[in-house]
Image (cartoon, rainbow, N blue to C red):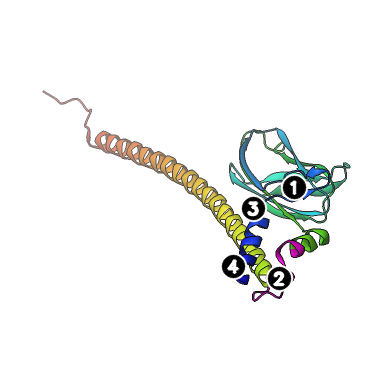
Amino acid sequence: MMAAGAALALALWLLLPPVGVGGAGPPPIQDGEFTFLLPAGRKQCFYQSAPANASLEIEYQVIGGAGLDVDFTLESPQGVLLVSESRKADGVHTVEPTEAGDYKLCFDNSFSTISEKLVFFELIFDSLQDDEEVEGWAEAVEPEEMLDVKMEDIKESIETMRIRLERSIQMLTLLRAFEARDRNLQEGNLERVNFWSAVNVAVLLLVAVLQVCTLKRFFQDKRPVPT
């Protein structure tokens, strides 16, 4: 009975949002991913809000376009340049701890005058729980009498499972991005192979026709026949 009561209290604590004196806090910022087409000679920027004292991981890949490269910059809410990369195909950057405000992510394709780029990027947040929240959770789920099941072990197991599931989702997303980039490369290579194969066939046919015509000229006798 004690274990069942502890499990029920834990489930209620996980499902119900914490309520403070001033009401419910702001909703947590969700992870996100986005794929967009960056035209040639253009620069495109995105803004992402972030809470204070959290961890922000930014991953990007160029999955389409000639060269598979792009310039990338990351600025803090105060306008400080945190990351600056030139002609990169992919990158992973972590900001920890974050500042409260809007981070600016820019992808620049100004160096390319012809080729557009297909860019994928993902934002991953990891907010650490405050000590007060952990203490409040312990007071909510621990009765006065001793429990057969240690709530700290349950909490640690759930947190470990959550982290592993999030990492699995991130890895699957990255694998999809790699698959899209490889597919674009294969399709581009196939188009080039087909084009040059057609050119080679056309050249071979032209050379064959010219050789036949040349041989016919060699065996043609244009001298007048005496009568």
Q: Are marks 3 and 1 in contact (CB under 8 Å)?
A: no
Which numbered circle lies on residue 152? 2
| Earlier sequence position, callout 3 versus callout 2 | 3
Look at the image and say whether residue 144 sits in the magenta stretch: yes
Question: Which residues are drawn in magenta?
Answer: 138-150
Is 195 or 165 nearer to us in this picture? 165
Residue on which the image places disc 3: 15
Look at the image and say whether residue 172 sits in the magenta stretch: no
Measure the alpha-carbon separation of dots 4 and 2. 15 Å
Residue on which the image places disc 1: 86
Measure the alpha-carbon separation of dots 3 and 2. 18 Å
- Determine the residue positioned at 83% across, 50% down: 52
Residue 103 in the image, given as x and y percentages of width and height: 79, 43
Task: Identify the secondary structure beneath mark 4.
Answer: helix
Measure the alpha-carbon separation of dots 4 and 3. 17 Å
Measure the alpha-carbon separation of dots 4 and 1. 57 Å
The residue furthest left is 227
> Which tag is nearer the camera, tag 4 or tag 3?
4
Q: Quadrant of residue 148?
A: bottom right
Q: Which amino acid type is shown beneath numbered disc 4?
A: Ala
| Earlier sequence position, callout 3 versus callout 1 | 3
Q: Which amino acid type is shown beneath numbered disc 3?
A: Leu
Instruction: Give the total of numbered labels.
Output: 4
Task: Identify the secondary structure beneath mark 1.
Answer: strand
Instruction: Look at the picture and state if 149 lies above or below 115.
Output: below
Q: Are marks 1 and 2 in contact (CB under 8 Å)?
A: no
Residue on which the image places disc 4: 4
> Which tag is nearer the camera, tag 3 or tag 1?
3
